[in-house]
Amino acid sequence: MDKEQNLQNSLKNNPDERGHFGKFGGCYVAETLMPLILQLEEEYEKAKNDENFLRQLSALNASYAGRPSPLYHAERLSQELNGAKIYFKREELNHTGSHKVNNCLGQILLAKRMGKNRIIAETGAGQHGVATATVCARFGLESVIYMGATDVKRQAPNVFRMKLLGAKVVPVTSGAGTLKDAMNEALRDWVTNVENTYYLIGTAAGPHPYPAMVRDFQSVIGKELREQILDIEGKLPNAIVACIGGGSNAIGIFHEFLDDKQIALFGAEAAGYGLEVKNGHAASMSGGRPGVLHGNRTYLLQNDDGQILEGHSISAGLDYPGVGPEHSFLKDSGRVNYVPITDEEALEAFQICTKLEGIIPALESAHGLAQVLKLAPKMDKEEIIVLNLSGRGDKDVETVAKYFGVEF
Amino acid sequence: MNNRIKASFDKCANENRAALVTYIMAGDPDINTSQEIVNKLAEAGADIIELGMAFSDPMADGPIIEAAGHRALKNGLTLEKTLNMVENFRQHNNETPIILMGYYNPIYIYGVEKFLQKAKRVGVDGLLIVDLPSEEDEELCVPALEKNISFIRLVTPTTDNIRLKTILKNSSGFIYYVSMTGITGANINDYEKVSKNVTEIKQQTDLPVVVGFGIKTAQDAQKIAQYSDGVVVGTVLVRAIENSLKEGKATKETINAPLNIVRSLSEGLFRKEQKNKT
């Protein structure tokens, strides 16, 4: 009886059968896409209960992506902050340099199952584009990556990587030429080529079943963390921190621990120039309100007329006016604390991590790290805080140099 | 069914022709010019007017209609002002049906109940909301039907028979068949398939079936008019408006640019053969 009640109260049961996380989520797409989305949902339900599929995915995770990713004690950073013991879950060591590959491997196996031979994806920082191009190369599938023209410029090395991997990179010039515009264009491609094309969405957003599916593929992060931390420390952490753009790395590490209520969960949103600067940030939960975009209801940056704003972040991967619907739900339910981190704070964390730990974090992950810098000093030495170090920062070196006025 | 919509299709059927459904973006390039175009559309030959509600992120539209929406927004259009345009139109015209077409978020933010009340009051006859499939009927479709505002749905080449039944369930006014998998403004490649699919849909419903997406010339329209109850033209009119602009602003040609096209299209919608209604 108690167990049954616990199950009912669990935060891990979402979404419902129609893709709702409380009032968020759902399936708001053009009719042309509905038959395919229903088919995808059906196919995913089958796949996730198919031992063969799961075994194949697990084997690829191990031998191709390099999982499990290590859990690393950031000793010098812990000493410097003189508070909690800090661990990094090192997703940046995965093949392609971020957590994105976890989701791409899962979805590419699904696309194969569905007989789709053309893969499209949107990308902001280029991490998801690179991961998609990579798995497409691995499985011999055609890939077309939509990327905002602004991002193509600020992430040039990733663009070249994608091309090397055989992908066609399409720069999108509408709007501000960032992630939102790339997603619009990918949806247009999908509506046009729905027969043979699989849309490999990179974050835990979009129409049902994507938010749940991407979360499931990313949940490997949290599951590994539980085992690793128990193994090393013999207890669970006191706090877990991750950055939030669409929020796939965050939901991937949070989901496993949603019912461990004693663990504080923190999502670091991109506050750009500051929440008070109009259209100067990309913190959709701290500075936006619920609306409907890209297939789901979620917190969005928008004006009073329901028009979507562009947002700003120094990090191309966080520069999106929305967030995955499960995060909106977790915000309203109070389970996760979503906090704004400015460009400046992220840049400072970026440098501290590089100097003290010899790890160059992605600017996205540096937002999470900035929150760790705020929390750790206030915690006891026996307490443990884990950062999801979701990506490596090689791709950001140019952006950071430019910020400090260094020209190559 | 909504009276204006029904009366319009009945009239066309009596004249043995397809209805001409015209789409323009409300407030493009500015509210006054757009208002004047809308006010003159019926006289030029439009049987039903679809008025686009501008949205920053129109995922199902091509670049021409996207640009029109952005022009309108830049020049101060809001959802409130779009509804005011309908109110103004109704002062001169009480017959021609007005369908508002767009995306859900601006309506959601305006408030569904407030939106439907005002829409009803100003004389909106139907809504076509691209990103509200039947799965989300409770959001807007059901409340709209309760106010006798039609909810028009898209049927597409990817719609199978089972899905068609789901779509038809809460459909009203008419059915909008999308001639292709794609965005507005692309080309129709397979007219035979369009004809076959429209015929199949008509076997499943008594609602009129109109065809849209990809109809650019009088010849295109005439082909489609032979077997459908209506022909939708949008991108071609919006492009005419765009081409008439100078530095993004209306010129003296702007108002007549789309109207001339409507005039020429409206002549090509008569059916060559008497339709066998049994």
Image (tube, coloured by chain):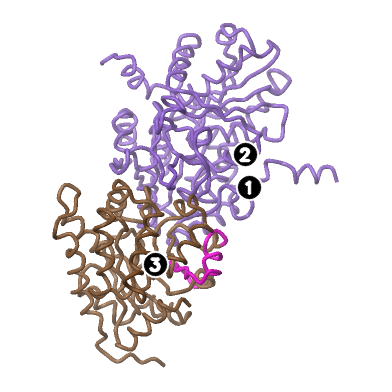
Calculate the distance from the C-alpha at mark 1 to the C-alpha at mark 3.
32 Å
What letter labels the chain drawn in purple? A
Residue A170 coordinates in the image, percent (x, y): 30, 42
Q: Is the residue under label 3 in contact with that under label 1 (CB below 8 Å)?
A: no
Evaluate if marks 1 and 2 touch, with contact meaning CB atoms under 8 Å apart: yes
Residue picked out by circle 2: A332
Q: Mark 1: which amino acid? A: Gly
Q: CA distance from mark 1 to mark 2?
A: 9 Å
Q: Mark 2 falls within which chain?
A: A
The chain ID associated with circle 1 is A
Q: Nearer the viewer, mark 1 or mark 2?
A: 2
* Residue range (magenta): B138-161
Is A134 above or below relative to B138?
above
Front in this rendered view, residue B119 or B188: B119
Q: Amino acid at mark 2?
A: Asp
In the drawing, does residue A357 fall left or right of residue B29? Answer: right
Which one is in front in this view, the residue at disc 1 or the one at disc 3?
3
Instruction: Specify few, some or many for label 2: CA neighbours under 10 Å numbering under 14, 14-19, or 20 or more.
Output: some
Q: How many marks?
A: 3
Whether B19 is drawn above or below A388: the answer is below
Disc 2, disc 3: CB below 8 Å? no
Residue topped by disc 1: A22
> Crowding near pointer 1: few (<14 within 10 Å), some, many (20+)?
some
The shade of chain B is brown
